[in-house]
Image (spheres, helix red, strand yellow):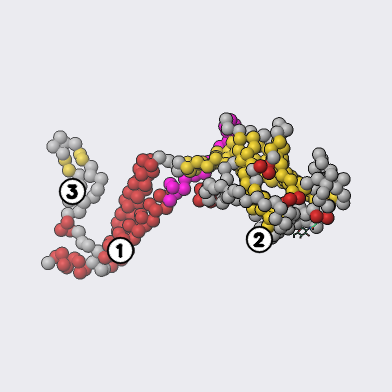
Amino acid sequence: MEERRSKSPGGIKVFDAFPKVATQHSVRSSRGGSSTIFLMIFVLFIAYVEIGDWFDGTMDRNFTVDNNGDDSLNINIDIVVAMPCNFLHTNVLDFTRDRTLAADYLSYEGVNFFIPSIYLLNDQRHVVTPDMDEIMKESLLAEFRIGISDPNSGAPACHIFGNIPVTKVSGDFHITAKGYTYRDFRSNVPPQALNFSHVISEFSFGDFYPFLQNPLDFTARTTNANIQNYQYFLSAVPTLYKRLGVEIDTYQYASTEEEKSFDNPGLGMPGIFFKYDFEAIKLIVEDKRISFTAFVVRLVTICGGLIICFGWAYRGFDKLIILLFGKKVARRGQEKAATFLAT
Ligand SMILES: *[C@@H]1O[C@H](CO)[C@@H](O)[C@H](O)[C@H]1NC(C)=O
């Protein structure tokens, strides 16, 4: 072995951190070769895991007061009610007593009543907490196709869909039968024709992301009562998702519901009522990560540390074998290389 410490001209001892062995003394071993390959694979694996972790970041949730100046938003609706379109009446009534004739914005299409099997039927509890990956993958903005409105087609059920612009105050979107509202009891729709069984494919607030799951999406209710009252109480929380420069500004909501049936239309109003309210806070869901430079420094440190530790472990193992079994065993597999080098 060469002298590792040497005197510099100035007389100061210089310490060489990397032990060097003169090439004529070193032997190539097959054990060393395969462990180097193993080490490289291991380091690559660690690097891969670290890079993946960095991209994923860590989920961070924050609340702020929702002081977004824009106080108008859309309600996105896609519902099928088991009644002909020309019996139905849709409206939004909000806290400021502003009445929006929802029919001006919605499309009506005569269809047959049908509940796809993946829909949750008459299930009271339906909790949806999509994770960040899902939200980012499925945040595809869309618009409803517009134009078709044939309320008098005579089809047994009615497909109601579209976006209704509302102001961000509590309100009530409802689907009732003509002649059964408080205002107007002169009905031309007989009570036996009422059927408020319904299928909800979309009920959301804000920009329309059809692939984001909301609590009422893909749910259905059926009833055997004609005078049936469904009430959904929705509490919407403005939510901003942020990831890698992409922002999705939307709403989450929680839904509780109540259903009642009556023997006679004088006792209660039949219909489907969505009572909604907005929280004054905004939830910001963001994935945070260290800066790219910090990440590279960390990665280099981890990989470098691994390589050095592995080197120590390898040399320590070698020494241990020599100690336990003597040089012969330790040098097994190296004779060829050694003799080759010797000649
Ligand atoms: C309403 O329609 C659904 C589905 O076709 C049916 O199961 C239910 O019995 C009907 N209810 C009434 C009151 O006719």
Residue type indicated by callout 2: Pro
Determine which residue is flagged by label 2: 116
Q: Earlier in the sequence, mark 3 or mark 2?
A: 3
Looking at the image, is 288 positioned above or below residue 43? above
Q: In the rendered image, which residue does mark 3 sit on?
A: 3
Split into 4 quadrants, where in the image is the C terminus?
A: bottom left
Task: Tell me the SS state at disc 1.
Answer: helix
Residue indicated by mark 1 = 34
Q: CA distance from mark 2 to mark 1?
A: 58 Å
What's under tag 1, amino acid-wise? Answer: Ser
Q: Position of residue 198 (x, y in %)?
A: 72, 54
> Where residue 273 sits in the image (x, y, percent)?
74, 45
Earlier in the chain: of badge 2 and badge 1, it is 1
Q: Secondary structure at mark 2?
A: loop
Q: Give the alpha-carbon distance from disc 3 to disc 2, as whole Å.
A: 81 Å
Query: Which region is colored magenta?
Result: 52-68
Residue at image position (20%, 69%) is 336
